[in-house]
Amino acid sequence: MNKTCRLCGQALPPKPLFELAGMPSGAQYYPTPAEFTGDTGVHLRLFVCAACELYQLDSAAVSYYRDVIRPSGFSRTMIEFRRKQFAEMVQRFNLTGKKVFECGCGQGEFLALWNEFPVEAYGVEHHADLVQSARSKGLRVQQGFVGSGEDTLAQGPFDAFTSFNFLEHQPDPNGMLQGIYRNLAEGGAGLITVPSLEYILDNDAYYELIVDHLLYFSRKTFTSILQKNGFRVVQFDDTIEDTHCAFVVKETPPDRERLNRCRIRIDSALASFVKQQGEGGGRIAVWGASHQGFTLLSGAGIASSVDFIIDSAPFKHGKFAPVSHLEILPPDVLAAEKLAAIIVIAPNYAEEIFQIIRQKYHQHCPVAIVRRGRLETRSS
C-alpha cells in the first residue's frame, strides 16, 4: 500500500476517507469461468492528502498502467471533439509545420486526426500490439513509456504534446509530467486531460472509482501538479463535464545562477567605484540605512572604504549598522563638508535623494545609484 501522497510526498492520513470492498481488480480484467472462484475483487481505500488535497487510492498500480486502451476512440462524438481541440491548438500555439507527440497513443485513434492538420505527428505507446496496430495505419509511433525526466523520445524535442486520461493511472504522476517536459522545446504547448473529481462529488458518482485510477484531480490539484512540473495552464475546456481539459505551455525554469552573476556584477562595480573615488583621500558616504544598504555593505566588501551612512529617519540617527558598524547620521551632515562620492542604496527613493543631494546640499560629487541589479553613476 502507498503511504505517501503521489503529488506532494507528504504522509497520507491514517484513515481513508472512503472505502469499497470487493471491487473489480481492473477495468481491463475479464475473468474466464475458470477464474470465477478466485475473483473476489480488491479493497479500495480513498485518501485525501491533508497537505495538497489530492484524492487518491493507496493501491498499487494495475499491471497495464503504461498501456492506453481507449474505447472512446470509437466514438464519433469524441473524435469530432478532439478534431476541434486540435484545430484550436494549431491556431493558438502556431503549430503549422511543427512537431507534436501524443503521450500514450494507444492504437492511434486520436493521433490519426493530426493528419488533417499541417503538423508532424508522432506517438509513444508502451504496449507492443497497440504500437503495431498504430503503425499498420501509417502512423509514426515509438514503443516506449514516458515515466520520468530521464526519458528521451526519438524525433524530439517537440513543439506540442497531447495526453488523454492517462495521468490518473500513474503511480508517479510527477515523473510522467517531467518526462513530457523534458521532451518539449522551450515554449512548447500541450493539451492534457484527466477525469474530474468535481464531477464525481457533485453527482454522487462513487461508481467512478476504480483501481485503475489511482488519482482523482480537482481543478485545483490538477493545476497544482502541472505547475509543480513546469507547466502553466492557459485555459480550461469544460465542454466534457466529467473531464478536466487543460491547454498548457511549458514554463522556462528559473535561472539558478542569476543571483550569483548579479552579485559579482554589482560588487565589482561598487568596488571599482569606491576605489576610484577614494584615491584622492576624500570621504565616501552611503545614503540608505535599510536592509538593502546593510546587505551591500556587508556583502560587497566596501565597508572599509565608506566613512558613514546617511538616512532621513530620525530614529536611526546615532545608531550603527550591523556587521560594518558604520555610524548612521542625518542628511544635514552634508552641509558641513564636501564628499568625494555618495552611494545611494534606496531603490524606491533614489531620484528624490539625488535631487536632495544636488539641490539642497549642493554636493556635486559623483553619485552612484544601486537599483534593478545595476550601478548607475552620475557625475553631474
Image (cartoon, rainbow, N blue to C red):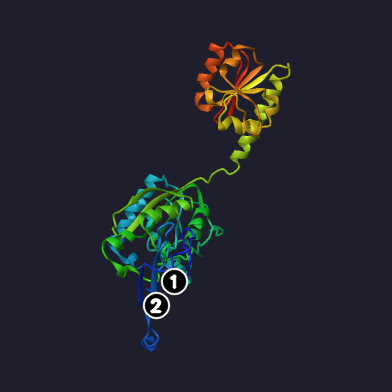
- Residue 263 or residue 164, whichever sits in front: 263
Q: Which residue is mark 1?
A: 59
Give the image quarter of residue 210: bottom left
Pointers 2 and 1 in contact (CB under 8 A)?
yes
Q: Amino acid at mark 1?
A: Ser
The residue sitting at 61% across, 34% down in the picture is 295
The numbered dot on residue 11 is none
- Say which element carries label 1: loop
- Residue 102 or residue 203, whichever sits in front: 203
Quarter of the image for the C terminus: give it: top right
> Looking at the image, can residue 380 be seen?
no
**Nearer the N terminus, badge 2 or badge 1?**
2
Q: Amino acid at mark 2?
A: Val
Residue 289, how many percent across, how many down?
57, 27
Residue 332, how many percent across, how many down?
57, 15
Give the image quarter of residue 318: top right
